[in-house]
Structure formats: structure tokens, C-alpha cells
Image: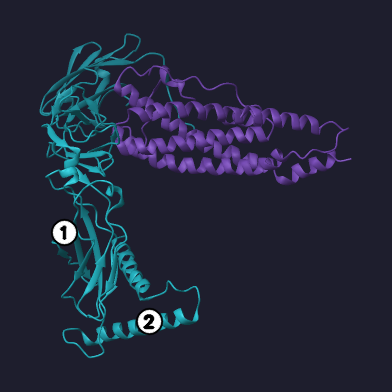
Chain colours: A purple, B cyan
Amino acid sequence: GDSWGIFTFLCAALCNLPALPALNCSEELGAGQSIQQTYDLTRYLEHQLRSLAGTYLNYLGPPFNEPDFNPPRLARTERVPSATVDLDLWRGLTDNARLAANYRAYSRLLCYLRVLDGQVGTAELRHRLAHFCASLQGLVLSIGGVMSSLGYPLPAGPPAPPGAPLASNDFLKKMDDFWLLKELQTWLWRSAKDFNRLKKKVPPAVVTLRLEAREF
Amino acid sequence: AVPRSVSLAADPAVISPQDPTLLIGSSLVATCTVSPDFPLKAADLYWTLNGRRLPATSYATLGPTTLSVALAHLNGSRQQSGDNLVCHSRDGGILAGSCLYVGLPPEKPVNITCWSKNMKDLTCKWAPGTEGETFLHTNYTLKYKLRWYGRDNTCQEYHTAGPYSCHIPKDLALFTPYEIWVEASNRLGVAVSDVVMLDLLDVVTTDPPPDVHVSRVGDLEDQLSVRWSSPPALKDFLFQAKYQIQYRVEDSSEWKVVDDVGNQTSCRLAGLRPGTVYFVQVRCNPFGIYGSKKAGIWSDWSNPTAASTPRSERAAGGCDPKGGEQNTTLRRELKQFFGWVKKHAYGCSNLGIKLYDQWRVWLQKSHKTRNQV
């Protein structure tokens, strides 16, 4: 991850020196494809999660699996990255900031999901959660790839592990699980829109023009 | 849509008992006490169990901010994650919750059966003792130890042969008895199965015999010759093998079994119908390994091999004339065609009536699975 970032940075820097011939920055040509893949992966995860969440909430039992269930979020459950920010505020961020927020959020959500995986009762649910975690890991890497191909640095360091579970009783833990799945759903829904918009911003044509401008 | 969520600094209320475990049929009185910081009174509260509101007749006010509910003759938990008993404020908001685990202690697991594939490993399966459900998540642990040495070992790889099974892949000794048992535990207790004692050599099974070939016996209309190889995995060990053959007519689902094959690797089937396609399978029982007196465990059946008995030109009785004749004409033509192909087309030497028969087997199999879907 980091070596890619450095290489891309050097490439971009060298490309901008007028005295040097144009260098073939092939990473930038790959950005469009990389964004498309990330978008596709996001949609796939959205679909997977709908089915997984349905099964998991049935396992938690009513009222958790009722359609309009909306429990209070206690202070301690806010360690799960919340997707509920002002949409105008979100759109006002730079691409870099939005990508970084996505990267950090999914990294942390992945950690919480892995803890969940270790505690669930039925073998079938464990198997499905493990599969979903693997796909989500792929998304984190994919977002990292997009950031590198656009010349953005990856957010620093691995996310802090959840540590000791904060939910002090089984019912609170069920509520934590509910909110984890709900936030994950909202993040994926919004990320799909983000990547769709980003795709339109980085078409292949733009990159070709940039290269031509650097030739002697 | 952005969900509206209320963020709260402290727990609005406390339920007691919190996450209790109870026997089916027991009764429970639970209390909900509102935190001092919250402007709610006992009269503002109500209870739900698994999303259903509990009748106010079961409530009792124990203090200005404490409401209790009485639950009698509890049924087994609706889900293994526990029944959701929730204390609400008048407007429906959740103040606190408690998970009720209502069920039965486990019963002794029974019917432990084990087998060793080629003396390399051990797989055991068992059945849970309870006919019905315990309603609680039950954990099963398979344990084993050498009879004459003290240390207990725990099996790690579960669900390899169904939900109640475990696989021990290595570090197993031969010529010495093992004690094997299964422990079932849930929130209400533990139950241990009876101990099964076995030596790995007594429960050996192997792969199905490879290289099964079925061919005609000259022009004999009612016979087929079956040949196979002994399973290679056990070829270095002294053992007597028993084999069994089963065969059936293509259109029937009734298998005929030939039991007295002994340890030959060939057998002749007789009394067959002329001009008929037969499917044949072979399996192996590696009994008597290293002189063990016990029978081994039968392997799976080999994949079916097909062959057909010859049909003489003279009309034979006992067959449906229309269908049978069409079949025979087609086969005869096919044989002639393959013969011609062999002579005139190089590189097609694998074509033959045998390949056609294998295709018939495959067709029937895929036809069956298509019907099952």
C-alpha cells in the first residue's frame, strides 16, 4: 500500500518537470478501471448484506427484525463509525477526504464484524459472516488502490482494535449488532453513489490529454 | 434516508434479572427501574416480550420509578440468542432490555460411530440425546484418550461429516484401544455420553475399488465379466479384502447385490438379460488388517460402470418387441459405425460401444439430478 503511494507520488512529481520527457504514468490510466471495480464491489456487498442482515436479525429475534425498529443509540455504541452525516457537508468534501473517510470507516467496521463472527451461535451464520468479512476486506484494499492510483496518500496506521467489548449485557450487545449492520448498510449505499460520481470525474480521455501536454 | 437516532449519555433504566437462564416451565418476576436522571415514573412504563406487549394485569408498581412484570410457565426460547424482554417508555422508546434463556439441560449424546480412512485419521459422528429441542445453544466436544495413558485430547475439526461429527486428522496410534466420548453443554448444564472403546484397526474403511471394468464374455448373452483393482492406499498392509458388487438394469432402480465375491478382483455376473444395458458398482471392506478379527467398514460404491449383454440375431422371448428392437438396431448400427471409424479415422481409437455405454450412464445420472431440481 505505502510503496504504491510513494511510487505514484514520484511519478506525478517527475511528470510535472518540463525538462524531462513525458513518463508513462500507467497508474493513472488504471484509475478509471479501479474505480469501476470498487463501485461493483460496493454494490455486490450491498446485496450480500441485505441477505445476511435479514438472517442475523431473525437470529436476534423480534423486535430487532421488525421493519421499523429504531432503538436509541447509547453513547458507548457510537464507536461504530456513523454514516449519518449531513449530505451537503459530505458532498462538500474533497475526493481525497471522502475516499479517506470511506477507507477508515470500512477498516473499523471490518474489525467489529470480525468480533461478531467469533461470538455467533449458529455455524451457518458464522460461515456467512466470514464470507462477508472476506469481501469487505477486498473493498478496503480496493479503496486503497483507487486512492493510490489517484495519487492520494493512504490514511495512516491500522485502525485500533475494538478491545474489550463495551456492551455490558446481552441485550445491549444485540443493540450494538443491530447498529453495526445498519451503519454498514448506510455506508455501502452512500459509497456506491460516491464511486459512481468519481467514475464520471476520471474518464480515460482526461488522462490522455494530460500526458499529451507534457510531451516536448 | 438518514435515520433519526437519539443519543443518550447513560442507561435510561436497569432491568433485573439481567440475562437470566431458566428452566422451561419456570416463572419469573422482572423489574424495571428508571435512572434518577430520567423524568419518568412507573406509570409511564410498559413491557414487551419478543415484540409483543405484555398485559398490564401482570404488572405491579414496586416504587415510584420501578415497575415489575410477572411471567409464568415460560416456554422454550423463541430464538437461541434469547427472548427479548424490553422495558419501554409510554411513547414506545426502549429504556432497557434483558435476554431470557429458557430451555432444558442437554441429554447424553448417543450412537457414537467412528471410522478411519486408510488408518490415517479418525472421524466420529453422534446423535444429540434430546428427541426435541433444548432451545438453548448446545456445544458438543468430542474427547478421546488412549486407554492406558491418562491425557485427554479434544477434537478440533467439527462438522466434517454432518452437524454432529468431528475429524481427528493425525497423531493416532494403532494396535491400542482408545476411549472416546462426547460432552454436550449448554447454559443449563452438561451431559456426557457413554464411553466408546475402539482400536483404529477395527474401524478401517478405504476408498472404493478403482479401475472397474465391465465387459462381455465372448458371445454369451446372459453374462458380463467385472474386473477391478484393490484400493491402492492399503496395498502395503496385510489385509484380506471383501468385495461386494451391485448391478441393475438401466431403467430400473432395483439393485441386485452379489455378496460372495470374497477377495477376488474379478467376478462373472450370470443370468442376465440379453441385449440389455447394466450399471455395475463395486465396494470394498478391508477386514482383517494386521490380523484383526473384526470386519472393517464398507467403502463407498465405485462410480457406476455400464456395459451391455450381447443380443443374438434370432428373436429371443421376454422383451418388449418395439422398444427392444429399436434399441438393438441403434446399438448395432452404432457398433458398425465405430468399427468403420476405427479403420478409417486415425486418432479416434477411443470411440467405441463402451464409450457409448458410459454416455448412457451419464445421461441417466444428469436426467435424475435435473428431475430433482
**Label 1: how many Cα within 10 Å (few below 14, some 14–19, many 20+):** few
Q: In this view, does A13 lie to the left or right of B163?
A: right
Disc 1 secondary structure class: loop
Q: In this view, does B139 lie to the left or right of A130?
A: left
Q: Mark 1 lies on which chain?
A: B
Labels 2 and 1 share a subunit: yes
**Label 2: how many Cα within 10 Å (few below 14, some 14–19, many 20+):** some
Q: Picture quarter containing residue A210?
A: top right
Res. B1 in view: no
* Residue at 26 percent of width and 20 percent of height: B45
Residue at mark 2? B334
* Residue at 12 percent of width and 29 percent of height: B24
**Residue A1 position (above or below residue A30):** above
Instruction: Estimate the spatial distance between the alpha carbons at disc 2 and disc 1, rounded to whole Å.
Output: 37 Å
Q: Picture quarter containing residue B290?
A: top left
Check the picture and name the quadrant holding the C terminus of chain B.
bottom left
